[in-house]
Amino acid sequence: MKLASKDLLGIKELTKDEITLVLDTASGFKDVLKRDIKKVPALRGKTAVNLFFEPSTRTKTSFELAEKRLSLDVLNLAVTTSSVVKGESLIDTALNVQALGADFMIIRHSSSGAAHLLSKNVNASVINAGDGVNEHPTQALLDAFTIKEKLGRIEGLKVAIVGDILHSRVAKSNIYLLTKFGVEVRIIGPPTLIPQELESHGVKVFHDMETGLRDVEVVMMLRIQMERQGKGFFPSTLEYFRYWGLTAERLSIADKDAIVMHPGPMNRGIEIASEIADGPRSVILEQVTNGIAVRMAVLYLLAGVRG
Amino acid sequence: MKVLIKNGHIIDPSQGIAGIGDVLIEDGKIKEVRIQNAEHRTQSTAPPTHPSPSRGEGKGGGENLVSDLRAIDAAGLYVLPGLIDMHTHLREPGFEYKETIKTGTMAAVKGGFTTVCAMPNTNPVNDNSSVTDFIIRKAIQEGACTVYPIGAITKGQKGEELAEMGIMHSEGCVAFSDDGRPVMNSLIMRRALEYSKTFDVPIISHCEDLSLSGGGMMNEGLLSVTSGLKGIPSEAEEIMVARDIALAGLTNGRLHIAHVSTEGSVRLVRQAKERGINVTAETCPHYFSITEKAVEGYNTNAKVNPPLRTQKDTAAIKQGLKDGTIDVIATDHAPHHRDEKLREFDAAPSGISGLETALGLSLKLVEEGILTMKQLIEKMTINPAKIMGINKGTLKNGADADVIIVNPDKEFKVEPEKFASKGKNTPFEGWVLKGAAVITICKGKIYEQ
C-alpha cells in the first residue's frame, strides 16, 4: 500500500488505512532508533528543506532528526535571515527552495492553508508541520502512535482533549484522526474556547472536567497560549487552572490506567499540575521520542509516492 | 446620427413597457420607443419570438446603413435600459494596478452596464471635491460608460468626522458611503443620516460590527472551524443592519444597506420596510449564487466581505429579492491583482471581480422562476437609479440612450483571462452562464461584444 498524495497536508485528507500504514511504518523506524547506529540510508541523496515561519523547538528538531536518520540532506530556512523579511511572497520563497533541489518542504506557518498553497505551486512533497489553527498532522500521528503503543489499540477508546480547542491545530488533527478510528472524543474547556460546531463532527462537548473526564482512557492536555490572556476568553490563568487544570484529584475521575498526554510546551500550574506532568501516567516525553519515528515514516512513505 | 433597434423584445420597467417593438435613438438620446404588440405583464423568461441561438447571435451585428441611420435587427433579443451598478470599485486613483476607470468601465460595458457608481475607497479617499472632480474628469476622458462617484461619509473613511458632503454632492457625488469600512460610531452615523437629508442623498452602509468580525476571513460555522479560518458570524452584519435601521427611524434619513448577505439581514430590512422606515437594500450575485463551500481548499478568489454564507442565507436572499425586500442587485465589483490573491488566505484581500458575470448569474433567477424578467431588470436599472437620484435606467423619450441588447440564449464560459477588467479574481471561473449583452449602447455610443 502507498499513500495517495505526494503531500501530507492534514489528517482530514487521509484515510484510516493510510493512517494505519504510517503508524505501522513508524513502528519499524522506532526499532531503528533503538539501535546503536540510529541511521538508515533510505533517502540518501534527497534533500529536505525545513521552512519554519513560526517559532518551534520540538517539531523542528524532531523533523530535523528524522530527516538525518533517513540520510537526507537537510536545509533549515530560518525566517529571520531569509528574504521573507524583505517582502518575498511565500510562493516565491518556495519556488526558490524548489529550484535549489528540494524533494521535501516541511512548512510551519501562522496562516491556515499555507501548506495547501505550497502544495498547489511546487512539485516537492509538502509536509504540514502546523498551519495557523488548521492542522498539525504529524503531531496527531505521533499521538496516535503513542496511544497505540501504550494501550494496545486506538479503536473504541474514550479520549478527552482539554483546553483551548478553538485555537489548537493539534486538537483539530487529533479530532479528525480519532473520529476516523471510532474513538469517543470529548472536548473539554470553557465555551469561549470550544467551537460548538464540532459537535456535528461527532465529538462530545463538555464544559466541566468532572463529567468530561469520567472513565476516559486518554487525557490530552493542550497548551493555554499566553497571548489569549486578556482577550476575554477567560478572566485569568488562576481561574482557568481552578476549573480546567489537570490535577491529581481530577485525573482520578478518569480510567484508573488512563495516560496523560501533552503536545508541549507545557505551562505547569496553568493547564497541568507538575505532579501530573512528571507523574507515572504521563507519557509526555515518550510522545517526543515517538515523534521522530513517525516523522521518519511520513518522509519515507511520501518518498515512495513520488518514486 | 440615428440608431434604430428593430423588432426587439423591449422591457422598460420604468415605464411599464414590455413587448416587441423598436427603439429609435437620435444624437445620444432616446427619441422614441414604439411597441407593436404590447404584453401587459411579461411573465415569460423567454422572448415571445423564440430565437434559435444561431439566429440570435450575429444578428446583433447585422446593420443597414441608410444615410446616417444605423439599423440593428434585435429580433429574438431583449432590448433593455442599460444596467446600473450602484456598487463598483474602480480603484482609481491610487490602485491603478488593480483597475482603472478605463478598464473598469470597459468591464462594465462588457457586462451590460452603462452606468457605474464608484466607491470612494481609493487612495486618496474620495472624501473631498478634488478627488470627486478627478474621477469625473477621468471618466469623461477615458470611461466607456457613465461614472457617478460616491463620496466618503467621513474624512479618510475613518468614521470620525463627516466629510464635505455638500461640496462633493455639488461636484457630482450621488451618494455617500465608507464602504469597506463600517461607521462604527453610532453618533457619527446618526449625524450622517441627518446631515445628508439637506441634499436628499442616500447613505450607503457597509454593515459590519468590527469588534465582532475582527480578523475574520469567512463565514463562521463548521467549515471555518475545520479550515482553521477565523469566522465572521452573521450577527456581525445583522447587529449593524439593526442599528442603522434604528438610526434611520430616528433621523428619517435615507439609508441603503450594501451587500446584504444573511437571512437575518433580509428579515430586518423586511420588518423595517413594513414599519415604514426609509430603507433600501442591495445584494450581489455571489450572495445568491454560491455559499461558503466555495472557500474550501483555501480559494482566495472566494474571499469576500461580507463573506459567502450558507444555503439558508442564499435562499432567504432569493426570497428577499422576490418579495421586494431587496431592491437592487449590485456587483460590489472589487478587482484585485493576481499576486494579491495568490497568497495565504488570511493575507489575501477580499473581493470579487463581478461586472462581467453579474448579468449571467442574475438571469439564473429568472430561469429558476424566482424573478420575472421585468423584476430583474427593475433591480438592475430603475431601482438603483431612483435610490441614487439619477436620471438613468429608463428608455423614456429624451433620456440618455443607454440601451443594451441581450441574447438570453447565448452561453458563455467564464474565463477570467478574457475579462476586460484587470481583476481576474472570480470564484465563477469555468462556469457556463447563459445570457449576455451582445450590444451595449452608452449615450448613443455602440459597443458590440
Image: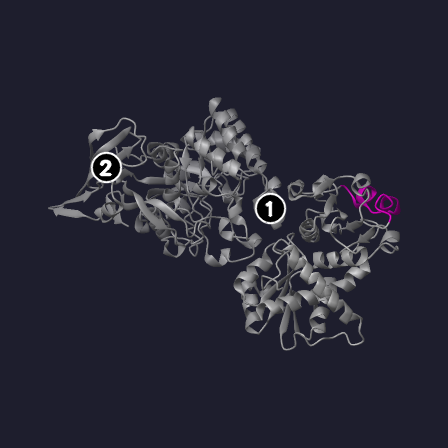
The disc at residue B137 is none
Q: In the rendered image, is residue B164 in sight?
A: no
Q: Position of residue B24 (x, y in %)?
A: 19, 38
In the displayed image of the protein, which residue is found farthest to the front? Answer: A1
Q: Nearer the viewer, residue B153 or A20?
A: A20
Quadrant the N terminus of chain A occupies? bottom right
User: Disc 2 or 1, which lies upstream in sequence?
Assistant: 2
Q: Magenta stretch?
A: A235-256
- Disc 2/disc 1 C-alpha distance (Å): 48 Å
Label 2: how many residues lie within 10 Å, few (<14), some (14-19) or many (20+)? few
Q: In the rendered image, is residue B370 in sight?
A: yes
Q: Position of residue A123 (x, y in %)?
A: 54, 67
User: Looking at the image, is A85 positioned above or below residue B22?
Assistant: below
Q: Is residue A240 left or right of residue B44?
A: right
- Secondary structure at numbered mark 1: helix
Look at 70% across and 47% down and name the residue there.
Answer: A165
Does the magenta-highlighted stretch encompass residue B383?
no
Residue B16, located in which quarter of the rendered image?
A: top left
Mark 2 and mark 1, same subunit? Answer: yes
Question: Which residue is disc 2 drawn over?
Answer: B49
Q: Nearer the viewer, residue B357 or B435?
A: B435
Q: Amino acid at mark 1?
A: Ser
